Every structure is written in C-alpha cells, then in structure tokens.
Image: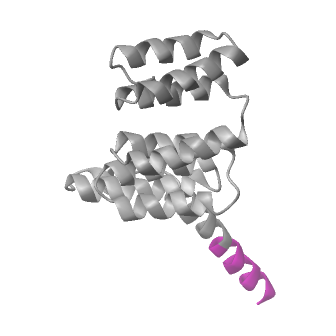
Amino acid sequence: MKFRSIAVAGVLFVSGIAVGYAAQKAAPSQYRDKDKQQAAHALLEVAKIQAGKGSWERIAIGRIYYLGGSKPEGQAIFDDILADDPEGTDLFRIARVYREAGDWEKAKTLFERALRENPKDSKGMAEVGAYYLLLGDRAAAEDLFDRSFKREDELWSTVAAAGGYLGVAPQE
C-alpha cells in the first residue's frame, strides 16, 4: 500500500512538472486557426510565465499589450514595475512605449525622472533631446544635447541628436 502511494505521488509530481513545462512553451494550438487577438493573448500568457520577475521581459510584454490595443493590460504591467522601485533603464523602456503610443506627457514624466535619477546618462539625455526636437521644442532639445555632450562625446548621443534634426527618432 505504501509503495502504491509513493508511486501515485511520483506520477502526480512528474505530471505537474510536465504541465508546468508545457505552460512555459508556445504551442501551435495557442495560435493556429485563432483570430489575431486570441492568438496574441494566448502567446502573451505564455510569455508572462516565461518572463518570471524579469522587468525588461515584462516591459516587452506590456509594450505588446499597450501598443496592440489592450492598454489596460499593458498599463497594469507597467504600474506593477513602477511600484517596485524600478531602475532607470526600466523607466526609459516604459517611457519609450508611451512615446511610441503617442502618450508624450506620460513618456516625458518618466524620461525626466530617469534623467534625475541618473544625471550622468549622456546617451539618455541625447535621446530625450531628440524626442523634444521631434515634437518641435528645439530649446529643450538643445539644452539636453548641451548637457549630454558636456558629459561625454559619445557616438550614440551624437547620432540621436543628428536624427532629431532630420525627423528620425532614436533607435530603441
């Protein structure tokens, strides 16, 4: 009797591992013959499991929700990350999503916060400056370019600034 209980427990344990493992993998049944929304949402559920607690990974998932027409789901992911003392790089990634979505005021708030928290980020200054320039605020843009180039004369900062003058957003 004891052996049977151990065997049953073993089978259940292995089955649980198999189910957990399967939940971490995208499967054709999740996206084939589904409409685009169903397929995307099924894959995003898998991606959430795959992402675990990784902030960059969760921001990537939130970006798809936010830009793909499910802003509340994306915002919930961003809010969760922002509530947990995020790093400056996380602030930048979320701000880029807001900018890409046309939510400049939300983006601006996070970009400014990131630059306050990391005042040595010359590349970030130039990137944000380029966004200001793209929106027609040349004075704010050039102030950020000045700050950036005083800190460090770096290729990516220069490229971001040049692109802003030509209407090209920095490569993200």
Q: Is residue 172 visible?
A: no
Would residue 131 appear left or right of 122 to someone viewing this image? left
Front residue of 54/43: it is 54
Classify residue 151 by image quadrant. Answer: top right
Residue lying at the far front in this picture: please name it. 139
Front residue of 52/6: it is 52
Q: Is residue 8 rendered magenta in the image?
A: yes
Determine the main secondary structure of the stretch shown in magenta.
helix
Q: Is residue 37 visible?
A: yes
**Which residue shows up at 58% across the image and 42% down it?**
112
Front residue of 148/19: it is 148
Magenta residues (range): 1-12
Above or below — where is 104 with respect to 166? below
Residue 168: image x %, image y %? Answer: 36, 19
Q: Is residue 49 rendered magenta in the image?
A: no
Residue 105: image x %, image y %? Answer: 42, 49
Total numbered circles: 0
**Which residue shows up at 76% across the image and 90% down it?**
1
Residue 154: image x %, image y %? Answer: 64, 11
Residue 118: image x %, image y %? Answer: 72, 37
